[in-house]
Amino acid sequence: MGYYSALRVLREGLTGNRGWKPLWREPDPKAAYDVIVIGGGGHGLSTAYYLAGTFGLTRVAVLEKGWLGSGNIGRNTTIIRSNYLLPGNEPFYELSMKLWEGLEQELNYNAMVSQRGIINLYHSDTQRDAYARRGNAIRLAGADAILLDQEGVRAQYPQLDFDNARFPIKGGLWQPRAGTARHDAVAWGYARGADARGVDIIQNCEVTGFLFEDGVCRGVDTRRGSIRADKVAVCVAGSSSRVMAQAGIRLPLESHVLQAFVSEGLKPLIPGVITFGMGHFYISQSDKGGLVFGGDIDGYNTYAQRGNLPTIEDVCEGGMALMPMIGRARLLRMWGGVMDMTMDGSPIIDKTPVPGLYFNGGWCYGGFKATPASGFCFAHLLARDEPHPVAAAYRLDRFRTGALIDEKGAGAQPNLH
Ligand SMILES: Cc1cc2nc3c(=O)[nH]c(=O)nc-3n(C[C@H](O)[C@H](O)[C@H](O)COP(=O)(O)OP(=O)(O)OC[C@H]3O[C@@H](n4cnc5c(N)ncnc54)[C@H](O)[C@@H]3O)c2cc1C
Protein backbone atom coordinates (compact mmCIF):
# COMPACT_ATOMS: atom_id res chain seq x y z
CA MET A 1 0.00 0.00 0.00
CA GLY A 2 1.55 3.28 -1.05
CA TYR A 3 1.63 6.07 1.52
CA TYR A 4 -0.40 9.13 0.52
CA SER A 5 1.18 12.53 1.01
CA ALA A 6 1.33 15.94 -0.64
CA LEU A 7 4.80 15.04 -1.95
CA ARG A 8 3.42 11.86 -3.50
CA VAL A 9 0.59 13.77 -5.22
CA LEU A 10 3.19 16.19 -6.62
CA ARG A 11 5.47 13.38 -7.80
CA GLU A 12 2.61 11.47 -9.43
CA GLY A 13 1.38 14.65 -11.07
CA LEU A 14 4.80 15.22 -12.62
CA THR A 15 5.15 11.61 -13.81
CA GLY A 16 1.79 11.02 -15.50
CA ASN A 17 -0.04 9.54 -12.47
CA ARG A 18 1.20 6.06 -13.38
CA GLY A 19 2.22 5.04 -9.84
CA TRP A 20 -1.21 4.80 -8.19
CA LYS A 21 -2.27 1.28 -7.21
CA PRO A 22 -5.79 -0.12 -6.55
CA LEU A 23 -6.88 0.52 -2.95
CA TRP A 24 -7.44 -3.17 -2.21
CA ARG A 25 -6.72 -6.55 -3.82
CA GLU A 26 -9.43 -8.72 -5.42
CA PRO A 27 -8.57 -12.11 -3.88
CA ASP A 28 -10.48 -15.35 -4.40
CA PRO A 29 -12.07 -16.71 -1.23
CA LYS A 30 -9.92 -19.12 0.78
CA ALA A 31 -11.34 -22.35 2.20
CA ALA A 32 -11.33 -21.11 5.81
CA TYR A 33 -10.85 -18.00 7.96
CA ASP A 34 -10.76 -17.14 11.66
CA VAL A 35 -13.56 -14.62 11.15
CA ILE A 36 -15.92 -14.03 8.24
CA VAL A 37 -17.62 -10.62 8.21
CA ILE A 38 -20.78 -10.58 6.08
CA GLY A 39 -21.42 -7.17 4.52
CA GLY A 40 -18.94 -4.75 2.98
CA GLY A 41 -20.62 -1.59 4.23
CA GLY A 42 -19.09 0.82 6.71
CA HIS A 43 -19.62 -1.38 9.73
CA GLY A 44 -18.36 -4.60 8.14
CA LEU A 45 -15.23 -2.92 6.79
CA SER A 46 -14.44 -1.09 10.03
CA THR A 47 -14.95 -4.33 11.97
CA ALA A 48 -12.46 -6.09 9.71
CA TYR A 49 -10.02 -3.18 9.96
CA TYR A 50 -9.99 -3.17 13.78
CA LEU A 51 -9.95 -6.98 13.96
CA ALA A 52 -6.75 -7.02 11.95
CA GLY A 53 -5.21 -3.76 13.14
CA THR A 54 -6.10 -3.57 16.83
CA PHE A 55 -6.88 -7.14 17.81
CA GLY A 56 -4.29 -8.93 15.67
CA LEU A 57 -6.62 -11.33 13.78
CA THR A 58 -5.48 -11.35 10.18
CA ARG A 59 -7.24 -14.45 8.82
CA VAL A 60 -10.33 -12.35 8.19
CA ALA A 61 -12.60 -12.04 5.13
CA VAL A 62 -15.30 -9.51 4.30
CA LEU A 63 -17.95 -10.97 1.99
CA GLU A 64 -19.99 -8.39 0.08
CA LYS A 65 -22.87 -9.36 -2.18
CA GLY A 66 -22.45 -6.34 -4.47
CA TRP A 67 -19.67 -3.76 -4.51
CA LEU A 68 -18.21 -1.83 -1.59
CA GLY A 69 -20.30 1.23 -0.89
CA SER A 70 -23.42 -0.05 -2.65
CA GLY A 71 -25.43 -0.06 0.58
CA ASN A 72 -26.21 2.66 3.08
CA ILE A 73 -22.60 3.66 3.62
CA GLY A 74 -22.76 5.27 0.16
CA ARG A 75 -26.33 6.53 0.53
CA ASN A 76 -26.47 8.53 3.75
CA THR A 77 -26.53 12.27 4.39
CA THR A 78 -23.08 12.06 6.03
CA ILE A 79 -23.87 13.59 9.44
CA ILE A 80 -21.61 12.64 12.34
CA ARG A 81 -22.36 13.70 15.92
CA SER A 82 -22.37 12.47 19.50
CA ASN A 83 -25.22 14.49 21.01
CA TYR A 84 -27.16 11.65 22.63
CA LEU A 85 -29.09 11.77 25.91
CA LEU A 86 -29.07 8.28 27.37
CA PRO A 87 -26.14 6.68 29.23
CA GLY A 88 -26.54 3.53 27.08
CA ASN A 89 -25.81 5.62 23.96
CA GLU A 90 -23.72 8.70 24.70
CA PRO A 91 -20.37 7.08 25.65
CA PHE A 92 -20.57 4.87 22.55
CA TYR A 93 -21.20 7.77 20.17
CA GLU A 94 -18.55 9.88 21.88
CA LEU A 95 -16.02 7.07 21.35
CA SER A 96 -17.06 7.16 17.70
CA MET A 97 -16.55 10.92 17.55
CA LYS A 98 -13.07 10.58 19.02
CA LEU A 99 -12.24 7.90 16.45
CA TRP A 100 -13.55 10.18 13.67
CA GLU A 101 -11.25 12.93 14.92
CA GLY A 102 -8.16 10.80 14.31
CA LEU A 103 -9.48 8.67 11.47
CA GLU A 104 -7.86 10.27 8.45
CA GLN A 105 -4.42 10.29 10.05
CA GLU A 106 -4.86 6.69 11.16
CA LEU A 107 -6.08 5.48 7.75
CA ASN A 108 -3.82 7.85 5.78
CA TYR A 109 -6.90 8.53 3.69
CA ASN A 110 -8.93 11.67 3.05
CA ALA A 111 -12.45 10.92 4.29
CA MET A 112 -13.27 14.64 4.32
CA VAL A 113 -14.12 14.64 8.03
CA SER A 114 -15.35 18.16 8.64
CA GLN A 115 -16.25 19.26 12.17
CA ARG A 116 -18.55 22.04 11.06
CA GLY A 117 -21.01 21.68 13.96
CA ILE A 118 -24.66 20.73 14.25
CA ILE A 119 -27.50 22.84 15.64
CA ASN A 120 -30.76 21.18 16.72
CA LEU A 121 -33.27 24.03 16.63
CA TYR A 122 -35.93 24.47 19.29
CA HIS A 123 -39.20 26.29 18.84
CA SER A 124 -40.89 26.25 22.25
CA ASP A 125 -40.03 26.59 25.93
CA THR A 126 -40.64 22.90 26.60
CA GLN A 127 -38.38 21.93 23.72
CA ARG A 128 -35.71 24.29 25.07
CA ASP A 129 -35.93 22.58 28.46
CA ALA A 130 -35.60 19.15 26.85
CA TYR A 131 -32.53 20.32 24.90
CA ALA A 132 -31.02 21.88 28.02
CA ARG A 133 -31.40 18.50 29.73
CA ARG A 134 -29.81 16.73 26.77
CA GLY A 135 -26.99 19.25 26.62
CA ASN A 136 -26.26 18.72 30.32
CA ALA A 137 -26.22 14.94 29.84
CA ILE A 138 -23.82 15.31 26.90
CA ARG A 139 -21.47 17.52 28.91
CA LEU A 140 -21.61 15.23 31.93
CA ALA A 141 -20.47 12.44 29.62
CA GLY A 142 -17.45 14.53 28.61
CA ALA A 143 -18.66 15.64 25.17
CA ASP A 144 -19.52 19.15 23.99
CA ALA A 145 -22.86 20.97 23.85
CA ILE A 146 -23.82 24.64 23.94
CA LEU A 147 -27.39 25.90 24.38
CA LEU A 148 -27.96 28.89 22.08
CA ASP A 149 -30.71 31.47 22.32
CA GLN A 150 -32.30 32.98 19.22
CA GLU A 151 -29.49 35.51 18.75
CA GLY A 152 -26.92 32.73 19.02
CA VAL A 153 -28.58 30.85 16.15
CA ARG A 154 -29.09 34.03 14.14
CA ALA A 155 -25.38 34.83 14.37
CA GLN A 156 -24.61 31.58 12.51
CA TYR A 157 -27.67 31.34 10.26
CA PRO A 158 -29.18 34.78 9.61
CA GLN A 159 -31.02 33.42 6.57
CA LEU A 160 -33.40 31.23 8.59
CA ASP A 161 -37.00 32.36 9.03
CA PHE A 162 -36.99 33.75 12.58
CA ASP A 163 -39.90 36.13 12.49
CA ASN A 164 -42.75 35.07 10.22
CA ALA A 165 -42.55 31.30 10.55
CA ARG A 166 -45.36 28.97 11.62
CA PHE A 167 -42.85 27.63 14.21
CA PRO A 168 -40.57 30.58 15.13
CA ILE A 169 -37.01 29.60 16.02
CA LYS A 170 -36.26 30.26 19.69
CA GLY A 171 -32.73 28.84 19.82
CA GLY A 172 -30.79 25.64 19.38
CA LEU A 173 -28.55 23.02 20.94
CA TRP A 174 -25.16 23.26 19.27
CA GLN A 175 -22.51 20.56 19.16
CA PRO A 176 -19.45 22.26 17.60
CA ARG A 177 -17.46 19.01 17.22
CA ALA A 178 -20.18 17.35 15.13
CA GLY A 179 -20.17 17.66 11.35
CA THR A 180 -19.96 15.60 8.19
CA ALA A 181 -17.65 13.11 6.48
CA ARG A 182 -17.58 11.83 2.93
CA HIS A 183 -19.60 8.62 3.21
CA ASP A 184 -18.14 6.37 0.51
CA ALA A 185 -14.60 7.56 1.20
CA VAL A 186 -15.05 6.14 4.70
CA ALA A 187 -15.76 2.72 3.18
CA TRP A 188 -12.79 3.02 0.81
CA GLY A 189 -10.45 4.18 3.57
CA TYR A 190 -11.38 1.32 5.89
CA ALA A 191 -11.18 -1.17 2.98
CA ARG A 192 -7.71 0.06 2.05
CA GLY A 193 -6.56 -0.14 5.68
CA ALA A 194 -8.06 -3.61 6.22
CA ASP A 195 -6.58 -4.95 2.98
CA ALA A 196 -3.15 -3.65 3.95
CA ARG A 197 -3.45 -5.59 7.21
CA GLY A 198 -4.17 -8.84 5.38
CA VAL A 199 -7.98 -8.90 5.27
CA ASP A 200 -9.49 -10.51 2.13
CA ILE A 201 -12.23 -8.25 0.76
CA ILE A 202 -14.37 -10.28 -1.59
CA GLN A 203 -16.98 -8.47 -3.64
CA ASN A 204 -19.82 -10.09 -5.62
CA CYS A 205 -19.96 -12.85 -3.03
CA GLU A 206 -23.48 -13.07 -1.60
CA VAL A 207 -23.97 -15.20 1.49
CA THR A 208 -26.90 -17.56 0.89
CA GLY A 209 -26.85 -19.68 4.05
CA PHE A 210 -24.91 -20.76 7.13
CA LEU A 211 -22.97 -23.94 7.91
CA PHE A 212 -23.90 -25.53 11.23
CA GLU A 213 -22.24 -28.44 13.02
CA ASP A 214 -23.79 -29.65 16.28
CA GLY A 215 -25.65 -26.36 16.60
CA VAL A 216 -22.46 -24.27 16.18
CA CYS A 217 -22.01 -21.86 13.26
CA ARG A 218 -18.94 -23.04 11.32
CA GLY A 219 -19.08 -20.91 8.17
CA VAL A 220 -21.26 -19.76 5.31
CA ASP A 221 -22.60 -20.80 1.93
CA THR A 222 -22.02 -18.21 -0.77
CA ARG A 223 -22.55 -17.85 -4.49
CA ARG A 224 -18.82 -18.64 -4.77
CA GLY A 225 -18.99 -21.81 -2.66
CA SER A 226 -18.84 -22.69 1.02
CA ILE A 227 -16.31 -20.99 3.30
CA ARG A 228 -15.52 -22.18 6.81
CA ALA A 229 -14.82 -19.89 9.77
CA ASP A 230 -14.41 -20.05 13.54
CA LYS A 231 -16.68 -17.04 13.87
CA VAL A 232 -19.23 -15.44 11.56
CA ALA A 233 -20.09 -11.75 12.02
CA VAL A 234 -23.22 -10.35 10.36
CA CYS A 235 -23.11 -6.62 9.40
CA VAL A 236 -25.70 -6.27 6.66
CA ALA A 237 -27.80 -3.28 7.88
CA GLY A 238 -31.08 -3.17 5.92
CA SER A 239 -30.75 -6.86 4.98
CA SER A 240 -30.36 -7.98 8.62
CA SER A 241 -33.71 -9.74 8.96
CA ARG A 242 -33.29 -11.59 5.65
CA VAL A 243 -29.76 -12.79 6.37
CA MET A 244 -30.45 -13.77 9.99
CA ALA A 245 -33.58 -15.65 8.88
CA GLN A 246 -31.18 -17.98 7.03
CA ALA A 247 -29.82 -18.88 10.47
CA GLY A 248 -33.33 -19.34 11.85
CA ILE A 249 -33.15 -16.15 13.94
CA ARG A 250 -36.02 -13.65 13.95
CA LEU A 251 -34.86 -10.15 14.86
CA PRO A 252 -36.73 -7.42 16.76
CA LEU A 253 -36.53 -5.00 13.84
CA GLU A 254 -38.28 -3.87 10.67
CA SER A 255 -36.79 -2.63 7.40
CA HIS A 256 -37.93 0.76 6.12
CA VAL A 257 -36.77 3.06 3.33
CA LEU A 258 -35.19 6.47 4.00
CA GLN A 259 -34.66 8.97 1.22
CA ALA A 260 -31.98 11.63 0.73
CA PHE A 261 -31.96 14.69 -1.52
CA VAL A 262 -29.34 16.94 -3.11
CA SER A 263 -30.03 20.31 -4.74
CA GLU A 264 -28.12 21.98 -7.54
CA GLY A 265 -24.83 23.57 -6.49
CA LEU A 266 -25.23 26.91 -4.71
CA LYS A 267 -22.82 29.46 -3.27
CA PRO A 268 -21.81 28.78 0.37
CA LEU A 269 -24.95 29.22 2.44
CA ILE A 270 -25.03 26.68 5.26
CA PRO A 271 -21.71 26.30 7.09
CA GLY A 272 -22.78 23.45 9.40
CA VAL A 273 -25.64 21.02 9.90
CA ILE A 274 -29.12 22.20 10.97
CA THR A 275 -32.06 20.14 12.17
CA PHE A 276 -35.61 21.48 12.34
CA GLY A 277 -37.28 20.98 15.73
CA MET A 278 -40.94 20.92 14.71
CA GLY A 279 -40.74 18.35 11.96
CA HIS A 280 -38.17 15.93 10.69
CA PHE A 281 -35.82 17.85 8.42
CA TYR A 282 -32.02 18.12 8.45
CA ILE A 283 -29.74 19.92 6.06
CA SER A 284 -26.09 20.63 5.32
CA GLN A 285 -24.20 21.85 2.27
CA SER A 286 -21.64 19.74 0.47
CA ASP A 287 -18.25 21.07 -0.56
CA LYS A 288 -19.56 21.10 -4.15
CA GLY A 289 -22.36 23.44 -3.06
CA GLY A 290 -25.35 21.06 -3.16
CA LEU A 291 -27.81 21.29 -0.28
CA VAL A 292 -27.92 17.77 1.20
CA PHE A 293 -31.12 17.11 3.13
CA GLY A 294 -33.57 14.51 4.34
CA GLY A 295 -36.37 13.82 6.76
CA ASP A 296 -38.51 10.91 7.92
CA ILE A 297 -38.49 7.34 6.72
CA ASP A 298 -41.31 6.54 4.31
CA GLY A 299 -43.14 4.67 7.08
CA TYR A 300 -43.95 1.31 5.49
CA ASN A 301 -41.92 -1.91 5.56
CA THR A 302 -39.82 -2.50 2.45
CA TYR A 303 -36.49 -3.80 1.18
CA ALA A 304 -36.58 -1.49 -1.88
CA GLN A 305 -33.82 1.11 -2.16
CA ARG A 306 -36.27 3.72 -3.45
CA GLY A 307 -38.98 5.80 -1.84
CA ASN A 308 -42.21 7.55 -2.73
CA LEU A 309 -43.52 11.03 -3.53
CA PRO A 310 -45.54 11.82 -0.35
CA THR A 311 -42.35 11.70 1.73
CA ILE A 312 -40.60 14.01 -0.71
CA GLU A 313 -43.42 16.52 -0.26
CA ASP A 314 -43.23 16.13 3.52
CA VAL A 315 -39.45 16.69 3.59
CA CYS A 316 -39.69 19.72 1.31
CA GLU A 317 -42.43 21.20 3.52
CA GLY A 318 -40.05 20.89 6.48
CA GLY A 319 -37.38 22.76 4.52
CA MET A 320 -39.81 25.49 3.45
CA ALA A 321 -40.99 25.97 7.04
CA LEU A 322 -37.42 26.58 8.14
CA MET A 323 -35.99 28.55 5.23
CA PRO A 324 -38.58 29.54 2.61
CA MET A 325 -35.91 30.51 0.07
CA ILE A 326 -35.03 26.81 -0.32
CA GLY A 327 -38.12 26.64 -2.54
CA ARG A 328 -36.10 28.42 -5.24
CA ALA A 329 -33.43 25.71 -5.36
CA ARG A 330 -33.79 22.91 -7.90
CA LEU A 331 -33.58 19.32 -6.75
CA LEU A 332 -30.74 17.57 -8.55
CA ARG A 333 -30.93 13.99 -7.31
CA MET A 334 -32.51 11.74 -4.71
CA TRP A 335 -32.26 8.12 -3.66
CA GLY A 336 -33.28 5.69 -0.94
CA GLY A 337 -31.60 3.23 1.40
CA VAL A 338 -33.02 0.42 3.53
CA MET A 339 -32.94 1.05 7.30
CA ASP A 340 -32.85 -1.70 9.91
CA MET A 341 -35.17 -0.06 12.47
CA THR A 342 -35.19 -1.64 15.93
CA MET A 343 -38.11 -1.46 18.35
CA ASP A 344 -36.36 1.13 20.56
CA GLY A 345 -34.31 2.97 17.93
CA SER A 346 -30.93 1.82 19.29
CA PRO A 347 -28.54 -0.72 17.73
CA ILE A 348 -27.54 -4.29 18.56
CA ILE A 349 -23.91 -5.47 18.89
CA ASP A 350 -24.03 -8.89 20.46
CA LYS A 351 -23.57 -12.64 20.30
CA THR A 352 -26.61 -14.56 19.09
CA PRO A 353 -28.15 -17.68 20.66
CA VAL A 354 -26.17 -19.69 18.05
CA PRO A 355 -22.54 -20.24 19.15
CA GLY A 356 -20.10 -18.83 16.60
CA LEU A 357 -22.64 -16.38 15.14
CA TYR A 358 -22.44 -12.67 16.04
CA PHE A 359 -24.73 -9.82 15.05
CA ASN A 360 -24.25 -6.10 14.43
CA GLY A 361 -27.28 -4.14 13.18
CA GLY A 362 -30.39 -2.20 13.99
CA TRP A 363 -28.68 1.09 13.15
CA CYS A 364 -31.91 2.76 12.09
CA TYR A 365 -30.97 5.92 10.22
CA GLY A 366 -28.10 6.89 12.50
CA GLY A 367 -25.47 4.29 11.78
CA PHE A 368 -23.04 6.30 9.67
CA LYS A 369 -21.78 8.34 12.62
CA ALA A 370 -21.35 5.07 14.50
CA THR A 371 -19.14 3.46 11.85
CA PRO A 372 -15.79 3.72 13.71
CA ALA A 373 -17.08 2.76 17.18
CA SER A 374 -19.33 0.05 15.81
CA GLY A 375 -16.41 -1.63 14.06
CA PHE A 376 -14.14 -1.17 17.07
CA CYS A 377 -16.67 -2.56 19.58
CA PHE A 378 -17.76 -5.43 17.32
CA ALA A 379 -14.13 -6.39 16.74
CA HIS A 380 -13.63 -6.29 20.53
CA LEU A 381 -16.60 -8.65 21.01
CA LEU A 382 -15.40 -11.01 18.27
CA ALA A 383 -11.79 -11.11 19.45
CA ARG A 384 -12.39 -11.29 23.22
CA ASP A 385 -15.89 -12.75 23.43
CA GLU A 386 -16.96 -9.98 25.77
CA PRO A 387 -18.66 -6.67 24.95
CA HIS A 388 -16.73 -3.43 24.90
CA PRO A 389 -17.88 -1.39 27.94
CA VAL A 390 -19.41 1.42 25.86
CA ALA A 391 -21.46 -1.05 23.79
CA ALA A 392 -22.48 -3.31 26.67
CA ALA A 393 -26.10 -2.11 26.59
CA TYR A 394 -26.60 -3.04 22.92
CA ARG A 395 -27.81 -6.53 23.75
CA LEU A 396 -30.08 -8.63 21.60
CA ASP A 397 -32.05 -9.86 24.61
CA ARG A 398 -32.97 -6.36 25.84
CA PHE A 399 -36.24 -6.65 23.95
CA ARG A 400 -37.07 -9.68 26.10
CA THR A 401 -35.76 -8.33 29.40
CA GLY A 402 -37.19 -4.83 28.89
CA ALA A 403 -33.83 -3.00 29.25
CA LEU A 404 -34.65 -0.82 26.26
CA ILE A 405 -32.62 2.21 25.12
CA ASP A 406 -35.41 4.42 23.87
CA GLU A 407 -33.41 7.55 23.01
CA LYS A 408 -36.36 9.34 21.45
CA GLY A 409 -38.97 8.20 23.96
CA ALA A 410 -41.19 7.05 21.11
CA GLY A 411 -42.03 3.61 22.48
CA ALA A 412 -41.71 0.22 20.86
CA GLN A 413 -42.60 1.22 17.33
CA PRO A 414 -39.79 1.12 14.75
CA ASN A 415 -41.34 3.59 12.31
CA LEU A 416 -41.44 6.32 14.99
CA HIS A 417 -37.73 6.40 15.85
C1 LIG B 1 -30.79 8.33 3.00
C2 LIG B 1 -30.01 7.96 4.22
C3 LIG B 1 -29.50 8.96 5.04
C4 LIG B 1 -28.78 8.63 6.18
N1 LIG B 1 -28.20 9.64 6.89
C5 LIG B 1 -27.40 9.35 7.96
C6 LIG B 1 -26.70 10.37 8.61
O1 LIG B 1 -26.74 11.55 8.21
N2 LIG B 1 -25.94 10.05 9.70
C7 LIG B 1 -25.87 8.78 10.15
O2 LIG B 1 -25.21 8.55 11.16
N3 LIG B 1 -26.48 7.76 9.50
C8 LIG B 1 -27.23 8.01 8.41
N4 LIG B 1 -27.85 6.99 7.71
C9 LIG B 1 -27.74 5.61 8.22
C10 LIG B 1 -26.45 4.93 7.83
O3 LIG B 1 -26.16 5.13 6.49
C11 LIG B 1 -26.59 3.42 8.14
O4 LIG B 1 -27.07 3.23 9.45
C12 LIG B 1 -25.27 2.69 8.03
O5 LIG B 1 -24.58 3.05 6.84
C13 LIG B 1 -25.52 1.19 8.06
O6 LIG B 1 -24.35 0.43 8.19
P1 LIG B 1 -23.44 -0.05 6.92
O7 LIG B 1 -22.66 1.10 6.43
O8 LIG B 1 -22.64 -1.20 7.36
O9 LIG B 1 -24.56 -0.50 5.90
P2 LIG B 1 -24.46 -0.88 4.37
O10 LIG B 1 -23.56 0.03 3.61
O11 LIG B 1 -25.86 -1.01 3.87
O12 LIG B 1 -23.74 -2.29 4.43
C14 LIG B 1 -24.40 -3.54 4.46
C15 LIG B 1 -23.83 -4.36 3.32
O13 LIG B 1 -24.27 -5.72 3.44
C16 LIG B 1 -24.37 -6.23 2.14
N5 LIG B 1 -25.17 -7.46 2.17
C17 LIG B 1 -26.51 -7.57 2.38
N6 LIG B 1 -26.88 -8.87 2.31
C18 LIG B 1 -25.75 -9.58 2.07
C19 LIG B 1 -25.49 -10.97 1.87
N7 LIG B 1 -26.46 -11.86 1.93
N8 LIG B 1 -24.22 -11.36 1.62
C20 LIG B 1 -23.20 -10.44 1.56
N9 LIG B 1 -23.40 -9.11 1.72
C21 LIG B 1 -24.66 -8.70 1.97
C22 LIG B 1 -25.01 -5.09 1.36
O14 LIG B 1 -24.82 -5.23 -0.03
C23 LIG B 1 -24.31 -3.88 1.96
O15 LIG B 1 -23.19 -3.47 1.18
C24 LIG B 1 -28.58 7.28 6.55
C25 LIG B 1 -29.07 6.27 5.71
C26 LIG B 1 -29.76 6.61 4.54
C27 LIG B 1 -30.25 5.52 3.63
Image (tube, rainbow, N blue to C red):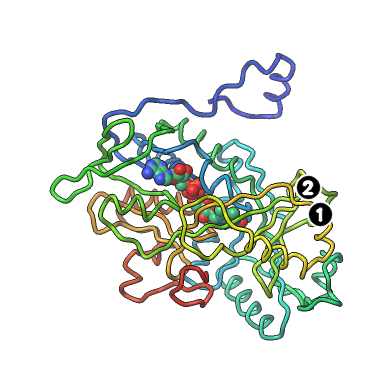
Tell me which corner region of the image, top left, top right, bottom left or bottom right, holds residue 103: top right
Pinpoint residue 258: horizontal percent, then vertical percent: 56, 57
Task: Residue 408 in the image: state x and y as whole percent.
Answer: 53, 74
Q: In the image, is residue 140 above or below residue 157? A: below
Residue occupied by mark 1: 329
| Element carrying mark 1 | loop
Which residue is painted at 23% across and 47% down in the image?
A: 217
Q: Amino acid at mark 2?
A: Glu
Q: Nearer the viewer, residue 55 or 415?
A: 415
Q: Please report the residue visible at 72 percent of the width from the left and 72 percent of the height from the top.
A: 121
- State how far apart marks 1 and 2 are (Cα): 7 Å
Give left or right: position of 82 versus 89: right
Asked if marks 1 and 2 touch (Cβ < 8 Å), the reply is yes
* Disc with the residue nearer the chain's start (1 vs 2): 2
Q: Secondary structure at mark 2?
A: strand
Residue 73: x and y in percent read: 54, 47
Q: Which residue appears at 71% of the width and 59% of the height? A: 283
Q: Residue 281: x percent and y percent?
A: 67, 65
Provide the residue designation for mark 2: 264
Within 8 Å of ligand 1, the CB of disc 2? no
| Ligand 1 lies under 8 Å from the Cβ of mark 1 | no
Q: Is residue 366 left or right of residue 154?
A: left
Three-letter amino acid code of the residue under disc 1: Ala
